[in-house]
Amino acid sequence: MGGAAFLIRGELDYGKHECKPQKKTFLQRLRLRRQPEGPKILEFGQGKLIDVPAEKLSGMSAAFREYLHNRIPKPWSSTNVFHEYLDAGVIGTYVRGEQPADSSSTDWYVQMTFSGCAGLGEIAAELGAHWAERWYQDEGDFITTSFLEPFHFTPGPSRSEDHFKRAFLPLGHLGYGLYVGHLKDQQYPPEYAFELDAGATEYMKYEDYLRLIKEIDETFEPVMSDGLCRCQLCMPDFDAASVEGRLKALLNQP
């Protein structure tokens, strides 16, 4: 499936969401009105997963986009590419609980998921999760009172494993590049220092793509050697135009 997600962990008043049988009126029976859908429970070897219908949280995606527009009134070219990605309706909001087989307690979380668009938008999805985390850091009280509390969900402390260090570089019409050069000392290091969205380069011949990614590595890896993120939220004063100009020179564009 791919994609990326941002999790808000906490406690859910599950009793408020259990679907209890309701007495139907004669008119409702005539109209064959269905009972409201309740939580779905998937059991597996190590426990069970509870999926609670979250239509009432669908407004979170619009609020997230409004936050981005307010924080970034003059988007860079790469940020506009991300907005186009969001226009495709790629955000899903879920409320889930995981209960191990040997425990009676449930680990509840609200999950904002960003689609990888069948592999074409994996980097945009990572950026979406990164910016959703920034949104929660900046406007957590608003998110809680407007969405989570009415859903009977109480946020708790986050976990270290939920935070991924992501560093992005704006690359103009190619969107954002994800810097992975800091992973080169791992057992299975990445081949290149940057990862690009497949949807941004699928029009290129493979040999042209290889030439581009190698030149991007040679040109911009020194810029990212400090590991700091240069997206428009993390570093709004970064000179994205100069990067775009150097990128156009690499692509022989006017």
Image (cartoon, rainbow, N blue to C red):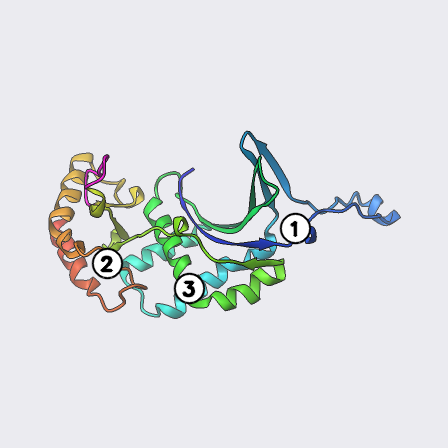
Q: Residue at x 45, y 61 (%)?
A: 64
Residue 253 appears in the figure: no
Which residues make up the magenta segment? 185-193
Relative placement, left or right, of 121 versus 30 is left
Disc 2 is placed on an element classified as loop
Q: Which residue is mark 2?
A: 228
Cα–Cα span, label 3 and label 1: 26 Å
Where residue 147 sits: x, y (%)? Answer: 57, 62
Cα–Cα span, label 1 and label 2: 40 Å
Residue 237 appears in the figure: yes
Q: Amino acid at mark 1?
A: Tyr
Q: Amino acid at mark 3?
A: Gln
Considering depth in this image, is 188 or 131 the residue closer to the camera?
188
Q: Which residue is mark 3?
A: 137
Q: Residue at x 31, y 65 (%)?
A: 75
Considering depth in this image, is 115 or 249 the residue closer to the camera?
115
Is disc 1 surrounded by few (<14), some (14 to 19) or many (20+) residues within 10 Å? some
Where residue 199 sits: x, y (%)? Answer: 31, 43
Is disc 2 surrounded by few (<14), some (14 to 19) or many (20+) residues within 10 Å? some
- Residue 14 — which label? 1
Disc 1 is placed on an element classified as helix
Q: Is residue 119 magenta?
A: no
Is disc 3 surrounded by few (<14), some (14 to 19) or many (20+) residues within 10 Å? few
Q: CB atoms at circles 3 and 1 under 8 Å apart? A: no
Where residue 45 sits: x, y (%)? Answer: 55, 29
Q: Is residue 13 above or below residue 45?
A: below
Cα–Cα span, label 3 and label 2: 18 Å
